[in-house]
Image (cartoon, rainbow, N blue to C red):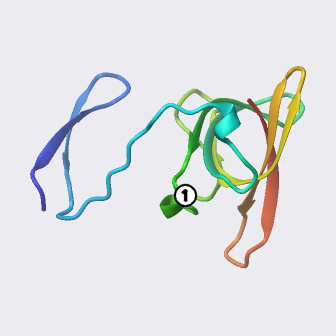
Amino acid sequence: MAPLCGEGTRDGAKLKVALADNPQIAGVVKASLSDIKQGSFLGVMAMPRADGSQSALEVHIFPEAMRGTGEGHYPWDLRPQSTMTNANVEQVVTAVDGQTLTLKYALTRSGARKASEMSC
């Protein structure tokens, strides 16, 4: 194992994390909605809307080498009732009130897929 690395939590508590000998490390760089294209693989943290759609809080564009990472839709801890959807962009629609992304992800190991709409 590599040396321990110090890290903080959202509530400010300190953690010590042991890294594997060959950890994969990814960084975050600023991007804009225009960088999102059909076929991009995204991680979207969102809040549910009354109509069943999602309103994005954060959008992460994954590099191609990370395609498929955490694919699916599940609860997240950013805010109460927030969700995370890691999926492929099926469609991008720009309207007067913002951009809507249709994301598609695997639902089951058999390959069934589900679409989810996100407003950005």
Callout 1, which amino acid? Gly
Residue 21 in the image, given as x and y percentages of width and height? 17, 64
Q: Is residue 60 left or right of residue 95?
A: left
Q: Residue furthest left?
A: 3
Residue shown at the point (86%, 28%) measured from the top left: 50
Q: Which image quadrant: the N terminus?
A: bottom left
Quarter of the picture containing the C terminus is top right
Task: Give the side of residue 20 with respect to residue 36, left or right.
Answer: left
Q: Mark 1 sits on what residue?
A: 70
Q: Can you tell which quarter of the image residue 13 is in?
A: top left
Above or below 96: residue 21: below
Mark 1 Cα shell of 10 Å, populated few (<14), some (14-19), many (≥20): some
Residue 58 shown left or right of residue 20 in the figure: right
User: Where does residue 16 sit, x and y in percent of width and height?
Assistant: 18, 41
- For residue 101, above or below residue 73: above
Q: Residue at x 9, y 51 (%)?
A: 3
SS at mark 1? Answer: loop
What is the residue that sits farthest to the front in this orientation?
34
Residue 46 position, x and y percent, is: 67, 33
Residue, far bottom: 110
How far across and how far down the image is residue 104, in percent?
76, 57
Q: Residue at x 87, y 20 (%)?
A: 97
**Residue drawn at x 76%, y 52% as measured from the top left:** 38
Q: Is residue 54 above or below residue 61?
A: above
For this view, does 25 lie left or right of residue 100?
A: left
